Image: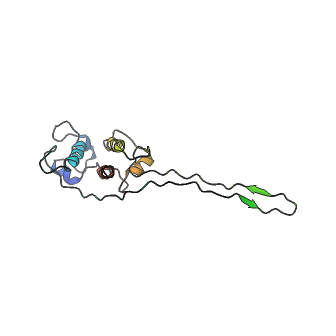
């Protein structure tokens, strides 16, 4: 999967089964094919005929808006130390309870894991989609906005949509 819909690729003479055509330039305009696709998504936000970057306009992708959730703040649990009942001749012994540190929570779409959803997260995702940057596993998890196990243009659209709210 190269992040571009098969219909879009077929309309431009590209092979939907060839992930390598992501970095090609199908019309010689100086952009990669994935950049043309991303630009077309932006152009589609304008009224018909106002801006055209690609020789054929793709069909509107169906986008489901993700629910916007507040980041989860986890307070460490307060635990009482365990008290062992002493035998008649033994002194009282207390042992502190062992608590596991909680894993930090991250905001969905926070690609660079800086704690906030900004345009920098979009840039990092585009760099990843273009193969110019590798993400750590945690970044990949929070970047997968629709939880389909893949990072692609849909995740870009969902992050951009969340930023515009």
Q: Name the colour scheme.
A: rainbow
Q: Residue furthest front?
A: 165
Rendering coords of residue 1 (x, y %): 30, 51
Q: Nearer the viewer, residue 132 or 24?
A: 132
Q: Nearer the viewer, residue 27 or 108?
A: 108
Residue 132 higher or lower than 148, as above or below = above
Residue for point 76% across, 61% down: 84
Instruction: Give the total number of marks visible in the rendering.
Output: 0
Q: Nearer the viewer, residue 38 or 23?
A: 38
70 with respect to 162 (left or right): right
Q: Residue furthest top?
A: 30
Residue for point 21% across, 38% down: 31
Find residue 148 and report its image quarter. Answer: bottom left
Q: Nearer the viewer, residue 105 or 154?
A: 105
Rendering coords of residue 136 (x, y %): 43, 44
Residue 90 higher or lower than 132, as above or below = below
Find residue 33 and report its image quarter. Answer: top left
117 with respect to 20 (left or right): right
Residue for point 32% across, 44% down: 129
Rendering coords of residue 64 (x, y %): 29, 59
Rendering coords of residue 105 (x, y %): 48, 52
Q: Residue furthest right?
A: 89
């Amino acid at each position: 999967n190269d992040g571009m819909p098969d219909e879009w690729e077929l309309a431009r003479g590209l092979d939907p089964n060839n992930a390598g055509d992501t970095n090609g330039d199908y019309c010689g305009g100086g952009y990669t094919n994935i950049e043309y696709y991303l630009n077309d998504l932006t152009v589609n936000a304008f009224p018909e005929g106002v801006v055209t970057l690609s020789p054929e306009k793709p069909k509107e992708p169906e986008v489901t808006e993700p629910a916007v959730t507040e980041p989860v703040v986890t307070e460490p649990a307060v635990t009482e130390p365990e008290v062992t009942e002493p035998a008649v001749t033994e002194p009282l012994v207390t042992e502190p309870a062992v608590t596991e540190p909680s894993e930090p929570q991250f905001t969905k779409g926070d690609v660079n894991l800086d704690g906030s959803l900004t345009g920098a997260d979009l840039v990092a995702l585009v760099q990843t989609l273009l193969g110019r940057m590798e993400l750590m596993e945690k970044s990949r998890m929070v970047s997968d906005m629709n939880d389909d196990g893949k990072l692609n243009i849909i995740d870009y659209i969902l992050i951009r949509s969340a930023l515009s709210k």
